[in-house]
Amino acid sequence: MASRFKLVFAVSLLLLLLDFCRGSIVGVCYGRNADDLPTPDKVAQLVQLHKIKYLRIYDSNIQVLKAFANTGVELMVGVPNSDLLAFSQFQSNADSWLKNSILPYYPATKITYITVGLEVTESPDNASALVVPAMQNILTALKKVGLHKRIKVSSTHSLGVLSRSFPPSAGAFNSSHAYFLKPMLEFLAENQSPFMIDLYPYYAYRDSPNNVSLDYALFESSSEVIDPNTGLLYTNMFDAQIDALYFALMALNFRTIRIMVTETGWPSKGSSKEKAATPDNAQTYNTNLIRHVINDSGTPAKPGEELDVYIFSLFNENRKPGMESERNWGLFYPDQTSVYNLDFTGKGAVDMTNSGNGTKSNGTTWCIASSKASESDLQNALDWACGSGNVDCSAIQPSQPCFEPDNLVSHASFAFNSYYQQNGASDVACSFGGNGVKVDKDPSYDNCIYLTTRGINKTAASNTTAMANTSSSTRAEVCAWIATFCLMTLISFVLNLGNVAVASF
């Protein structure tokens, strides 16, 4: 009996430590309000190519759930506002949904969260009162199949749930939402689910540029904003908004609920009234955000606190209503080329993609394909570069590091640049009949490395080699050591139980 107790204790300790050592994560929101997006299986390939491990979807679309089977990508699945009435009224509706829309694909498709309702306080049909009953019924359905501890249930909110957010220490929930927020917070605390919030410093800057500096919104501020009540110093709006939520939760004595940011980001294009919506600002915000999160920086009120964040969004969505920026939040265009590139590890330098919106690099120039060139001109130029031009185009072949995204502009850009660098990086070498464009920002991405004149003696085969990152944080090393120790202890207990059983026999 004692040995069995030790075994259970060791397993529980191991799982607890592994969860503790996970650290903050960065995911991406996969919205589909568009009529020109790639098929879900293509999206799954793109997500894996860019090493995105966490994805939020807004419904339980069968094709999407199937596409992400056996990919290792963890999904946050949404229940739309339109389903709240049915789910809140009858337990059988929640049971049927789980049976038909989730269980057939789980666990091959990893599902870790179910979000019930989307920013209901902003919804014109005022479905707030339906949210908690729907959450309860979905949790009950999960309990019936033993998944309530593996799949957490929550709901997403806009910052409009707060009546005050500045200074952060004065953060308070809007009293008009108390009738549904209080039971929701009790549900989250009881079931150890996170409070999910959609945060957009971009809107705060766009709507009040005289009160909010662009640098403060982009994590670039060199000055500090002081909370007069606590003396805490804030260098970015994101932290200030998060802490306003923490203080609002503490004011209601909900101190154990953690916060998860289920949407944040920055648009890359906007109308004439949205001058801050640019690729450079979008890249700056999301790059700084990723580094801030991955480093487990926490916030001034919660230093070192883990915070999971999802960037909005995977694609530009051409059917979204509103100002032009609403259709330009994507990391990728529908053709799967990057609007700008992000390093999701938070460790590397910011680089760019074929859009030409990355960082400058010490006077070095590259040659890429013009986005204005016709497909026939690009194909002819690509054929010439890989033929008579003597360019090694093996890296853009299937399964090679520069094959994805599989489109003509991307493949031609790689070939054009190789020819350009091999021929002295002269203006003439980037002509290609007017289809080549010189840029001063590195088009390399992931393991696809674009040549430079300084690296021309290195073979193109270097593109096929992933750069191993041998550095690791002290926390990661300690956690790995602890996990190994617990695992060895667990194995020892199992062996001892086996010996006891043999001896008894």
Image: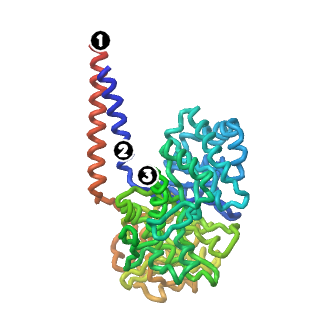
Specify whether 235 is left or right of 495: right
Residue 431 appears in view: yes
- Mark nearest the camera among 3 and 2 is 3
Mark 1 and mark 2: Cα distance apart in space = 34 Å
Specify whether 121 is left or right of 496: right
Mark 3 or mark 2: name the one nearer the start of the chain: 2
Q: Position of residue 312 (x, y in %)?
A: 56, 64
Q: Image height check: is 289 above or below 181?
A: below
Mark 1 or mark 3: name the one nearer the start of the chain: 3
Callout 3 environment at 10 Å: few (<14), some (14 to 19), or many (20+)?
Answer: few
Q: Image height check: is 301 above or below 67?
A: below
**Residue that appears at 48% across and 88% down:** 428
State if disc 3 and disc 1 touch (CB < 8 Å). no
Q: Secondary structure at mark 1?
A: helix
Image quadrant in which the N terminus is located? top left
Q: Secondary structure at mark 2?
A: helix
State if disc 2 and disc 3 touch (CB < 8 Å). no
**Residue that appears at 42% across and 83% down:** 365
Q: How many marks?
A: 3
Mark 3 and mark 2: Cα distance apart in space = 23 Å
The residue indicated by pointer 1 is 504
Mark 1 and mark 3: Cα distance apart in space = 50 Å
